[in-house]
Image (cartoon, helix red, strand yellow):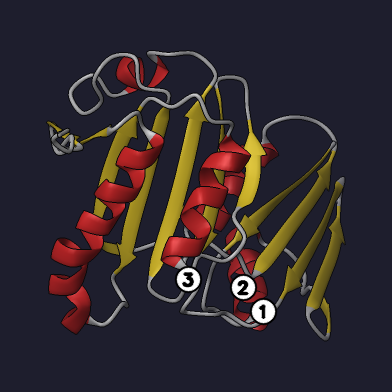
Amino acid sequence: MEVSRSLRTSLPLAAICARLEAQFGWPPFVIDAGVARLTVDDLRLELEWVPFDPRRELRGNVIATLAYEGQGFARRWDDALDAMNEPARFRFEDHYYLRSALAIDAFVAALQQPFQLPELHHDCENDNEWCMVETDDVVVHVSHAYRLGTYHEWQPKRCPPRCNYWIEVMVKAAAPAALDQAWRVGWRQRWIEALQELGRGQVHIDGVWHRRRRSLGR
């Protein structure tokens, strides 16, 4: 069996190898530029390393591949990698919920220009699909459930019934603190207004529905 996973760590490749060698009693890895390899017993391991980028919270810089036979080792391997993984850190985040008939591609396209977001990367699973993008200061995650009510079932205290979109806007801990007020006031309001346009005139945040005001007719 062969499994691969991504790891985010500021450790240099030699230090990663040294930790694994000490923990499992292995002989030294063979390191060639940014790749380390080791074959021991019925295990074959490979680490592909690139320099750590502290401005990218979601981008792994190590691809760890394990090929093995038998049972029981994969969990120990995951635990060893988890101990070196540096999780994303955010200073604050907003969670928006709404209902929209738009497909996810059209939905995220409507957000890219007003917020000057790079291309969002798409992925999916059984219950939902999502797009994510990361800049120097913020991570934006747009999730679309295939069935109304999914997010309410997952987060009944936060999400009201019959929403099929969940948008997370997460400001990184490393973002300039001087921007906090601008984000919490002006930037948040821009998100509310943009999502109201996509969500039938209303969006839910912090336990409150924000509804677009109707203009008075003549």
Mark 1–mark 3 Cα distance, whole angstroms, equals 26 Å
Choose mark 1 or mark 3, whichever is in front. Answer: 3
Report the front residue among 54 and 65.
Answer: 54
Residue 217 position (above or below residue 7) = above
Q: Position of residue 51 (x, y in %)?
A: 64, 83
Q: Residues within 10 Å of mark 2 (few under 14, many from 20)?
A: some
Mark 1 and mark 2 in contact (Cβ < 8 Å)?
Answer: yes
Residue 137 position (above or below residue 214) = below
Q: Amino acid at mark 3?
A: Thr
Label 1 sits on a secondary structure element that is helix
Q: Position of residue 190 (x, y in %)?
A: 27, 58
Q: Which mark is residue 13?
A: 1
For marks 2 and 3, the one nearer the N-term is 2
- The residue tagged 2 is 16
Q: Which mark is residue 135?
A: 3
For marks 1 and 3, the one nearer the N-term is 1
Q: Is residue 94 left or right of residue 88?
A: left
Mark 2–mark 1 Cα distance, whole angstroms, equals 5 Å
Label 2 sits on a secondary structure element that is helix
Residue at screen point 41% across, 17% down: 150
Mark 2–mark 3 Cα distance, whole angstroms, equals 27 Å
Label 3 sits on a secondary structure element that is loop
Report the front residue among 47 and 133.
Answer: 133
Q: Is residue 154 left or right of residue 46?
A: left
Report the front residue among 61 and 197.
Answer: 197
